Amino acid sequence: MCRWLAYSGTPVLLDTVLYRPEHSLINQSLRSRMGVESTNGDGFGLGWYSADGNGTPAVFRDIGPAWNNRNLQELAAHVRSPLFFAHVRASTGSAIQQTNCHPFRHGRWLWMHNGAIGDFNRLQRDLCMAVDPALFPCIEGSTDSEVMFYLAVTYGLDQDVPGAVARMAGLVERLGKEHGVAEPLQMTVAVSDGERVWAFRYSSQGRSRSLYYSSRADTVRHLYPEIDYLREVSDETRIVVSEPLGDLPGVWNELPESSYAVIPSGPDVDYLPFIPEF
């Protein structure tokens, strides 16, 4: 499986989040505490939007491990972004190649995934046949994650993100049952259009991979006034992570099973229920 991080809020240098925390994503690539594998060294990727860009994200991906990539460290120390994704990969069987590294990009959209489609080789043909023929040539790699992305685009990601992801998940569940796969889907997914981030946690068996979101920055500032960088970020700044970046109480909240979060969030609701749509 994999570990990932999504940041949205006040523009920051990427290394502020990727390298500096006690249990940063780079640390997790070598010593994950909550993943199926403790090491996630089968490639990595970044996707980021610039504050003054045209809405199309930049992507940097490589097949080596994140913990010793000097280009990644150099880039992270000089790129400032208000919204970015980062992913470290542990392959579930697909090839270790650049086109299989997350995040995936299509137009203004970024997508990354931790989990797997059960017996993907048995379902792959039927799933791919459901992708819009105009989008099929965009699939460059061989992962279930990328197919899930283009199914979501096919099912209306541009118009209704939760609905499109629910329809994608419903198709995987239905085809899995038809092919005798008892537990077809395991996923934590992040998707963004450059303005908002949606984060989903769901699995067929009801035991999804870990996913956490940060408390509001004003809450964390109140708890820990000594943390300098928090003075510079807006109250709406949030981070979603596969596992917490540190152990400070009150900072991290587990996203419940079968739910999704939207960032920026509303004033009263941090997350909503997620149900596949058949």
Image (cartoon, rainbow, N blue to C red):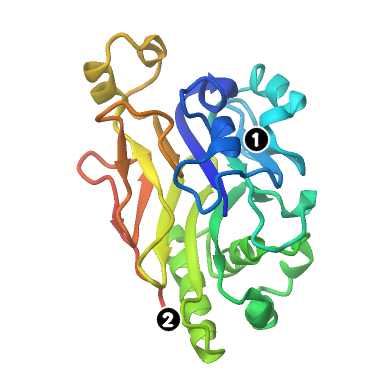
Label drawn at residue 54? 1
Q: Residues within 10 Å of mark 2 (few under 14, many from 20)?
A: few
Disc 2: which residue: 278
Q: Amino acid at mark 2?
A: Phe
- In the rendered view, tell whether residue 256 sits above or below residue 14: below
Q: Is residue 91 left or right of residue 242?
A: right
Mark on residue 88? none
Q: Kindly identify the residue that appears in the image at 43 percent across and 41 percent down.
A: 243
Per the image, label 1 sits on a secondary structure element best described as loop
Q: Are marks 1 and 2 in contact (CB under 8 Å)?
A: no
Corner quadrant of residue 237: top left
Depth check, mark 1 against mark 2: the one in front is: 2
Could you tell me residue 163's position as x and y percent? Answer: 43, 66
Please state which of residues 104 and 38 is positioned toward the viewer in this rendering.
38
In the depicted structure, whether residue 49 falls above or below residue 76: below
Question: Measured from the top left, where is residue 155 in percent x and y?
Answer: 54, 70
Q: Residue at x 58, y 51 (%)?
A: 111
Q: Nearer the viewer, residue 243 or 10?
A: 243
